[in-house]
Amino acid sequence: MAVDRVGKIYTGGSDGTLRIWNLEAKREPKIIEIHSSEMLQMKLSEKNRFIATSSMANELVINDFTGIKIVMSTREEGRVNAI
């Protein structure tokens, strides 16, 4: 889970999706399919432009929130333990 400076909450699911909750809007979260397996970790960049996530499938993905696109994706040998 991560929280940005404007109050949005980011959660990762066992289905590999990222959910972005906007509590002020009081609606269902935006759901983005990122990984093929359970998401393990996430880290927002300082200005909330990028989010890095890792998964049980040894994937590391960096997304750019200006257009919700994958900037980088890699499959590592062994588990990605830190972002």
Image: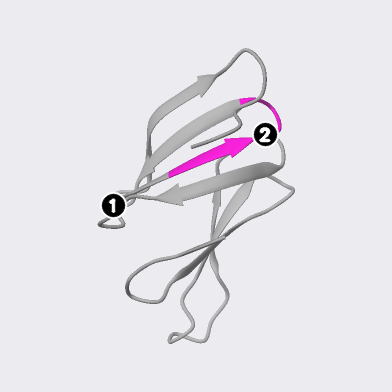
Relative to 10, is 39 above or below? Answer: above
The disc at residue 49 is 1
* Quadrant including the N terminus: bottom right
Task: State the SS at label 1.
Answer: loop
Q: Is residue 54 magenta?
A: yes
Q: Nearer the viewer, residue 42 or 20?
A: 42
Relative to 63, is 81 above or below? Answer: above
Q: Residue at x 61, y 32 (%)?
A: 81
- Crowding at mark 1 (Cα within 10 Å: few <14, some 14-19, many 20+): few
Q: Residue at x 62, y 12 (%)?
A: 77
Q: Quadrant of residue 76?
A: top right
Residue 16 in the image: x percent, y percent? 66, 44
Give the residue number, with chain letter if any, for mark 2: 36
- At label 2, the amino acid type is Ser
Q: CA distance from mark 1 to mark 2?
A: 23 Å
- At label 1, the amino acid type is Arg
Q: Quadrant of residue 59?
A: top right
> Is 61 on the left or on the right of 48, as rendered?
right
Q: Nearer the viewer, residue 35 or 6?
A: 6
> Is 57 on the left or on the right of 46, as rendered?
right
Q: Is residue 56 magenta?
A: yes
| Type of colouring | one colour
- Crowding at mark 2 (Cα within 10 Å: few <14, some 14-19, many 20+): some
Residue 12 in the image: x percent, y percent? 62, 53
Asked whether the residues under the numbered discs 1 and 2 touch, taking CB atoms below 8 Å apart as contact, a structural biologist would say: no
Please provide the residue range marked out in magenta: 52-58
Relative to 22, is 55 above or below? Answer: above
Task: State the SS at label 2.
Answer: loop
> Is 28 on the left or on the right of 66, as rendered?
right
